[in-house]
Image (cartoon, grey):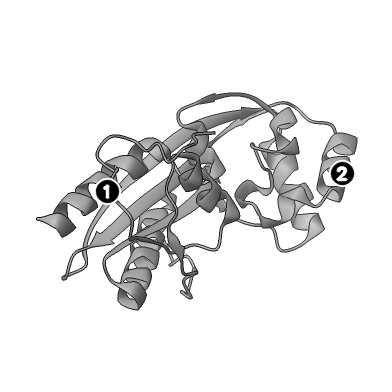
Amino acid sequence: MIKNGIRPPGLERLTDFTLASASPRRLELLRHIGLEPRVIPPHVDESQRPGETPSAYVERMAHTKATAGWLAAGAICLGADTVVTMDGAIFGKPATIQEAQHTLKRLAGRNHQVLTSVAVAAGQAGTIRHLTSVTSVWMKAATESEITAYVATGEPMDKAGSYGIQGLGSFLVTRIDGSYTGVVGLPLFETVILLQWADGLVRS
């Protein structure tokens, strides 16, 4: 954990920005790099459009959330969205225990992709830029009893793909190729690039 107010280069003066997300994991990741945003959870329709690809969906959601936060607070607003996808299907947060179990059975023994898009709206016009992190995740061939026991902990119920790589769900993951923080919910490499751009825009 980064302490004593140390921040990434280029963000030393960033003090006023909004996180348009109710995710405690995204807030924790920003705090990990010394940032303390104002939090305004967005109220947006997160329905997938007919024929919309996972990448188009996650980018649209990030844009929509960033715009909603910017309209509410102005200045700089960061929005993000994460999806788990395999074979063109999106696995969102499970609505029921049965759905979580079904998702984990489908992911078991295979690799899937985690897409997290980050969008930042900044300046008087709310100009938006975005970047998307794509990470491949390989899962063990978990047994039905392992899946049942994991779901019974409650951890999968508020997470895309029905697992948390930063928590107990890490026992399911054999390896990843890409961004760990992107799988958690906010890829910090892309986030810092966008916040550096936004801070420069606001100060210009």
The kind of secondary structure element at disc 2 is: helix
Picture quadrant where residue 93 is located = bottom right
> In what quadrant of the picture does the N terminus appear?
top right
Task: Please give the name of the residue rendered at 42% of the width and 48% of the height, measured from the top-left corner.
Answer: 35
Q: How many labels does the image show?
A: 2
Task: Please give the name of the residue rendered at 23% of the width and 62% of the height, measured from the top-left corner.
Answer: 122
Which amino acid type is marked by label 1?
Arg
Is 58 positioned to the left or the right of 123 in the image?
A: right
Q: Nearer the viewer, residue 163 or 79?
A: 79
Which amino acid type is marked by label 2?
Thr
Is residue 153 visible in the rendered structure shown here?
Answer: yes
> In what quadrant of the picture does the C terminus appear?
bottom left
Q: Where is residue 165 in the image (x, y as percent from the top left)?
A: 64, 36
Task: Please give the name of the residue rendered at 28% of the width and 34% of the height, measured from the top-left corner.
Answer: 9
Is 16 positioned to the left or the right of 160 in the image?
A: left
Q: Residue 13 carries which label?
A: 1
